[in-house]
Amino acid sequence: MHLTRLIYVSRRNPDVPTDLEGLLETSRRRNAENQITGALWVDGTYFVQVLEGARHVVSATYHRISRDPRHTDLELVSCESVSARAFADWSMGYCGDTRSNRQTILKFSGHDQLVPGEMSSSSLLSLVQALEVS
Ligand code: FAD
């Protein structure tokens, strides 16, 4: 298996409300079936998602997600072969917009709001790994 890690960022679509619980429930179920792991940052503006798993499955999942009307302006940050998973315990960990996570964002980026376009792929990955996941 070619273990692959893909990171993308997108903007929430203000015209299509997102039921986060439903989104996480579907994502976790589908990802568990596909042996995908990862994490999802959500605030009022952005999604940042890390997907890890077999290359063909990560690719198919990303293409399905990219057609979802709940977000727009998808930007592929990175897609690379890796030797180990960073989120092995999470079929999709949720990184919420909490005070503690904002402090972590401040340490990484100098802002207390995430501006994904200003961060490199490695900084984004390190940031998501440092966030509280639930
Ligand atoms: P169906 O459930 O058959 O839906 C058909 C269409 O409607 C699809 O285009 C779907 O995207 C869209 N849709 C589904 N529910 C809603 C809704 N509540 N409101 C508006 N449109 C809707 N899926 C995963 O499997 N793994 C993930 O890690 C994952 N992460 C996601 C992250 C984000 C930020 C978003 C927005 C979606 C994510 N999804 C994820 C969901 C994914 O986009 C699909 O909705 C889901 O995988 C079901 O796909 P389906 O083809 O069976 O669509």
Image (tube, helix red, strand yellow):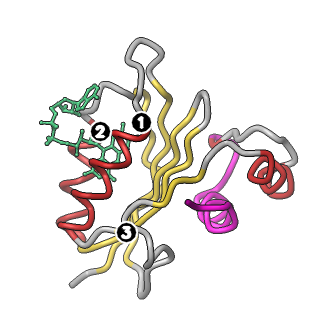
Q: Secondary structure at mark 2?
A: helix
Q: Marks 3/2: CA distance? A: 17 Å
Q: Is residue 20 inside the magenta stretch?
A: no
Residue at the image position 43 percent from the left and 29 percent from the top: 73
Residue to which mark 2 is pinned: 66
Q: Earlier in the sequence, mark 3 or mark 1?
A: 3
Residue at the image position 36 percent from the left and 27 percent from the top: 70
Residue 36 lies in what quarter of the image? bottom left
Assess mark 2: CB under 8 A from ligand 1?
A: yes
Quadrant including the C terminus? bottom right
Q: Which mark is residue 74?
A: 1
Residue at the image position 37 percent from the left and 68 percent from the top: 37
Q: Earlier in the sequence, mark 1 or mark 2?
A: 2
Q: Examine the residues drawn in magenta and state their main secondary structure.
A: helix
Residue to which mark 3 is pinned: 37
User: Where on the image, by quarter, is ligand 1?
Assistant: top left
Residue extent of the magenta highlight: 117-134
Residue at the image position 84 percent from the left and 50 percent from the top: 106
- Give coordinates of residue 123: x percent, y percent: 68, 61
Assess mark 3: CB under 8 A from ligand 1?
A: no
What amino acid does circle 1 point to? Leu
